[in-house]
Amino acid sequence: MPRQNAWEPILSPSNFNSLKDAVLEIIEQSSWEEPILGDKITRILKRGAGMEISQRKMREAIKELRRDGHLIGSRPGTYGGYFKIRTKEEYDTFARMEFEAKISDMAETLRSMNKSAAEAFPLVLQPSLLD
């Protein structure tokens, strides 16, 4: 049975042992030039393997795959989605756009909130036990 398009991999329960295996199989067919949207991954899993999963579960599976060492990238926007990282340049771009920018933004937010918290909740010194 021919695939309808590049994003219709043939999946069956015998092709994988877990949700992570199925998600990885789908993402490995993607690329920087042709990423796959998360909702398309969930649709493929439902049609191809009868797996009904939420976007949240799919994102959690991708997070776990990344922590297992799989090079899965993502990019936002109209032409965004998930993709298999195949070159050092793709990895560096992904890391800079998705992680470094978010880490920097979160650090700036935390600094601002720490400053506000210090003003709102000034340090109160306890009376000395020796007095």
Image: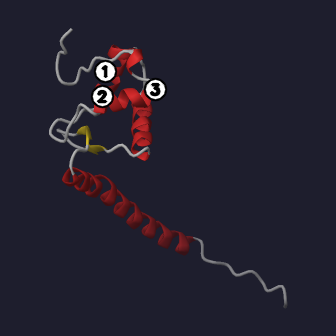
Q: Check whether the beta carbons of the residues at disc 2 and disc 1 lie within 8 A of each other.
A: yes
Q: Give residue 44's mark.
A: 1
Q: How is the image coloured?
A: secondary structure
Q: Quadrant of residue 83?
A: top left
Q: Which residue is mark 2?
A: 26
Disc 1 versus disc 3: nearer the observer: 3
Q: Check whether the beta carbons of the residues at disc 2 and disc 3 lie within 8 A of each other.
A: no
Q: Is 16 on the left-hand or right-hand side of 89?
A: right
In front of the other: 124 or 66: 66
What crowding class fits label 1: few (fewer than 14 Cα within 10 Å), some (14-19), or many (20 or more)?
Answer: many
Q: How far apart in space, not on screen, are marks 1 and 3 (Cα)?
A: 15 Å
Which comes sooner in the sequence, label 1 or label 3? 3
Q: How far apart in space, not on screen, are marks 2 and 1 (Cα)?
A: 8 Å
Q: Secondary structure at mark 1?
A: helix
Q: Is 56 on the left-hand or right-hand side of 93?
A: right
Q: Is 113 on the left-hand or right-hand side of 8?
A: right
x%, y% of residue 45?
35, 21
Residue at (29% x, 55% y) in the render: 95
Up/down of 21 relative to 5, above or below: below
Q: Which residue is mark 3?
A: 18
What crowding class fits label 3: few (fewer than 14 Cα within 10 Å), some (14-19), or many (20 or more)?
Answer: few
Circle 2: residue type: Ile
x%, y% of residue 16?
41, 23
Q: Quadrant of residue 65?
A: top left
Q: Give residue 62's mark.
A: none
Up/down of 105 relative to 5, above or below: below
Which comes sooner in the sequence, label 2 or label 1? 2
Q: How far apart in space, not on screen, are marks 2 and 3 (Cα)?
A: 13 Å
